[in-house]
Image (cartoon, helix red, strand yellow):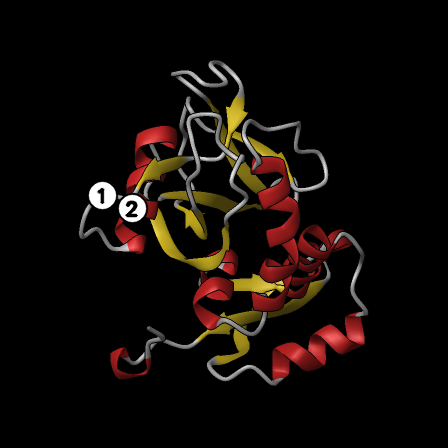
């Protein structure tokens, strides 16, 4: 059984959600791009395996991770039948020579069935945005302007959101509110800044 991780970040400069892949260092598919993945060790937790995969293959720590789904096609790995547990992870915003970042719409062909994994998991990521607070907070950071919320939603869904609906959605999220601070928009116009309230440890999601 293996764990493969869709490792994400929000690129503030390019205003895109990006996914990281790395060149494989061993056969099969030597030199080809692939999601970071590892074989699950006996007794290892999925979250620990995901963190290990991203560190070993991308040299990046994770700020949050979670499970998406399982891929069980018998011929997905030429070395033999193996299950793949697809995980999401949001990486710390650090430099790494091993990590190659792409938008979800510009991702090149990947080794194994990893292109299929990304395609089938993308709607699952969309479902989590603005609903799964652990995932959403990791992507947005502690505060963000509404323009970032628009860009994140567009990057994940592939289409621009309705701003009115998005603002109503943001206003309905527990633990998220409009900050007293302001962010400067184009031509010096001040704009609202959304800010997450501190998390009570007793209310953390499992």
Q: Quadrant of the C terminus?
A: bottom left
Task: Give the labeled residue for mark 2.
Answer: 49
Q: How many residues crowd mark 2 within 10 Å: few (<14), some (14–19), many (20+)? A: many
User: In the image, what residue occupies the spot 39% across and 56% down?
Assistant: 65
Residue 41 marker: 1
Q: Position of residue 13 (x, y in %)?
A: 61, 40
Measured in 3D between alpha carbons, the distance from the residue under mark 1 to the one under mark 2, in whole angstroms, is 8 Å
SS of the residue at dot 1? loop
Classify residue 59 by image quadrant: top left
Task: From this view, report whether residue 163 is shown above or below residue 19.
Answer: below
Q: Identify the mark at residue 19; answer none if there is no mark.
A: none
Q: Is residue 156 left or right of residue 117?
A: right
Residue 177 or residue 124, whichever sits in front: 124
Name the residue located 19 percent from the left edge and 47 percent from the top edge: 42
Q: Are marks 1 and 2 in contact (CB under 8 Å)?
A: yes
Residue 180: x %, y % from top left: 52, 76
Element class at badge 2: helix
Badge nearest the viewer, 1 or 2: 1
């Amino acid at each position: 059984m293996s764990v493969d991780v869709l490792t994400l970040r929000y690129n503030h400069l390019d205003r895109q959600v990006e996914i990281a892949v790395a060149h494989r260092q061993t056969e099969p598919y030597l030199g080809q791009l692939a999601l970071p993945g590892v074989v699950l060790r006996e007794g290892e937790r999925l979250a620990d395996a995901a963190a290990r995969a991203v560190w070993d293959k991308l040299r990046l720590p994770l700020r949050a991770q979670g499970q998406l789904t399982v891929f069980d096609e018998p011929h997905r790995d030429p070395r033999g039948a193996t299950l793949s547990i697809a995980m999401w992870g949001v990486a710390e915003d650090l430099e790494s020579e091993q990590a190659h970042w792409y938008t979800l719409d510009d991702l090149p062909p990947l080794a194994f069935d990893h292109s299929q994994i990304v395609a089938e998991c993308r709607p699952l990521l969309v479902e989590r945005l603005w609903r799964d607070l652990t995932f959403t907070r990791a992507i947005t950071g502690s505060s963000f302007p509404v323009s970032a919320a628009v860009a994140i939603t567009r990057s994940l869904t592939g289409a621009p959101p309705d701003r009115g609906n998005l603002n109503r959605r943001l206003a309905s999220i527990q633990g998220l509110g409009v900050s007293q601070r302001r962010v400067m928009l184009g031509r010096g116009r001040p704009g609202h800044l959304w800010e997450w309230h501190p998390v009570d440890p007793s209310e953390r999601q499992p």
